[in-house]
């Protein structure tokens, strides 16, 4: 039995709390207990890019971030687009996991494999559709295939998660963008403009409404998408919106400092205030990290060959607690966005996992501290106040400051 003494709940009550599991007493005076976090959007890179992350390093990074459940994306090599590939991926994950992280997997949408939706519906957390291309080969923007995917997902009670960026518009804007400008990392935010996201999302919302598909909009990054989502929610469309830490905390100003390292899809924007407003008015339902590790030497390549994405899972909670410290978000909202709501949206069973946080601990983010194989962070140098101290997963305590 784990006995947690004198811990404060996120609602401010001082309690003693017990969890079935190893024999351990934690004197938790001064610590606050939250349900362990669910990260509904990670890329743990298996199979195919284990040098960027695998489930040993990924699980360690997750635990250090207060996360005990992750939902992993299918843009692997090969892409995870069938029952067979899901089984193969799962077998590798089981071999790699040292810390027994809880996880769910997405099926990738491929227009030639849409019959896999019915075959895998009980094994997946959702169907991921890339309406615009990003890391990996997954892309499905053919209107007929999209119709079919939304219809089949609804028929099989499968949630559709979209990467909503319009591929044709990306290509068109890229062709129009002057060659000189295209070598400037800033052009990434211009080419993948708010209109690019808005156009794809409008299509997805229309299909969700038509087929009554439950729709999860990954990494909402613009005011324009938020307006569309608000309207759809008012109409009764079953749509849920995810925000990422990087769109909440970083802006296009980062290009100056980080160059190609600042590349991410959808790109950095200057819509931070609109996103925080949408957290307040509950247009945003979840926070997902889009933990997308790439090595520094890959990120430093010139425009055109540098990959997009940031590793961030181990800073997920610290960034939010720091925002709490800055009075941008309450602990109750953090719990709702990182646990209650993802659990409801993805129909994920309740468990006893918790994270104990020290709201007063201040620490500067350092690349050398990171457990992710990416070993670099766009947040390096930031001083954050509020960090996870113990993460309790399946009745075992992990001291986030002690893990090797
Ligand atoms: C992701 C990756 O690297 O896997 N990159 C990113 O910029 N977000 C892919 C994705 O989800 O778009
Ligand atoms: Zn992603």
Image: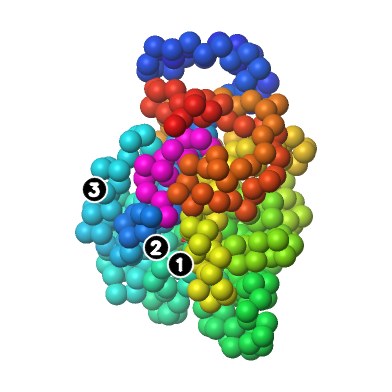
Residue 184 percent location from the top left of the image: 66, 76
Q: Are marks 1 and 2 in contact (CB under 8 Å)?
A: yes
Pick the residue in front: 214 or 290: 290
Q: Is mark 2 within 8 Å of ligand 1?
A: yes
Distance between the alpha carbons at the discs numbered 3 and 1? 23 Å
Q: Which residue is mark 3?
A: 91
Q: Are marks 3 and 1 in contact (CB under 8 Å)?
A: no
Q: Secondary structure at mark 2?
A: loop
Q: Which residue is mark 1?
A: 135
The residue carrying pointer 2 sits among few (fewer than 14), some (14 to 19) or many (20 or more) residues within 10 Å by Cα, namely many
Query: What kind of secondary structure does the magenta stretch mostly adopt?
Result: helix
Number of residue marks:
3
* Side of 346 where 223 appears, left or right: right
Residue at (70, 26) in percent of width and height: 360
Residue 280 percent location from the top left of the image: 72, 46
Residue at (22, 59) in percent of width and height: 84
* Side of 38 where 127 appears, left or right: left
Q: Secondary structure at mark 1?
A: loop
Q: Is mark 1 within 8 Å of ligand 1?
A: yes
Q: Secondary structure at mark 3?
A: helix
Residue at (52, 58) in percent of width and height: 296
Region rendered in magenta: 52-65
Mark number displayed over residue 246 = none
Distance between the alpha carbons at the discs numbered 2 and 3? 17 Å
Which of the 4 image quarters holds residue 299?
bottom right
Q: Which residue is mark 2?
A: 75
Residue at (28, 70) in percent of width and height: 113
Residue 210 percent location from the top left of the image: 49, 68
Relative to residue 158, is residue 192 depicted above or below?
below
């Amino acid at each position: 039995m784990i006995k947690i003494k004198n811990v404060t709940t996120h609602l401010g009550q001082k309690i003693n709390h017990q969890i079935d599991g190893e024999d351990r007493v934690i004197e938790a005076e001064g610590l606050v207990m939250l349900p362990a976090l669910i990260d509904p959007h990670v890329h743990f890179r298996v199979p195919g890019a284990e040098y960027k992350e695998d489930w040993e390093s990924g699980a360690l990074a997750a635990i250090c971030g207060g996360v005990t459940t992750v939902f992993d994306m299918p843009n692997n090599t090969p892409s995870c687009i069938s029952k067979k590939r899901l089984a193969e991926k799962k077998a590798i994950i089981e071999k790699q996991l040292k810390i027994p992280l809880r996880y769910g997997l997405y099926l990738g949408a491929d227009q030639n494999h849409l019959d896999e939706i019915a075959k895998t519906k009980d094994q997946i957390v959702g169907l991921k559709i890339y309406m615009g291309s990003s890391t990996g080969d997954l892309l499905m923007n053919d209107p007929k295939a999209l119709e079919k995917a939304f219809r089949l997902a609804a028929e099989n009670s499968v949630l559709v998660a979209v990467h909503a960026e319009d591929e044709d518009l990306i290509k068109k804007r890229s062709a129009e963008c002057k060659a000189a400008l295209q070598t400037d990392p800033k052009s990434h935010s211009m080419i993948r403009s708010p209109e690019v996201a808005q156009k794809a999302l409008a299509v997805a919302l229309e299909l969700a409404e038509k087929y009554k598909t439950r729709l999860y909009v990954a990494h909402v990054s613009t005011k324009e998408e938020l307006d569309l989502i608000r309207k759809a929610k008012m109409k009764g469309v079953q749509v849920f919106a995810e925000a990422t830490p990087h769109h909440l905390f970083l802006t296009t100003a980062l290009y100056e400092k980080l160059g190609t390292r600042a590349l991410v899809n959808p790109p950095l924007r200057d819509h931070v205030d609109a996103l925080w407003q949408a957290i307040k008015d509950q247009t945003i339902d979840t926070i997902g990290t889009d933990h997308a590790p790439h090595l520094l030497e890959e990120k430093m390549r010139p425009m055109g060959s540098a990959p997009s994405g940031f590793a961030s899972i181990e800073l997920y909670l610290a960034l939010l607690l720091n925002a709490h410290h800055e009075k941008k978000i309450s602990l109750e909202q953090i719990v709702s966005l990182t646990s209650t709501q993802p659990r409801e949206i993805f129909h994920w069973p309740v468990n006893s996992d918790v994270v104990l946080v020290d709201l007063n601990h201040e620490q500067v983010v350092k690349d050398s501290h990171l457990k992710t194989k990416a070993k670099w962070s766009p947040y390096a140098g930031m001083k954050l106040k509020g960090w996870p101290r113990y993460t309790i997963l399946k009745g075992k305590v992990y001291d986030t400051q002690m893990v090797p």
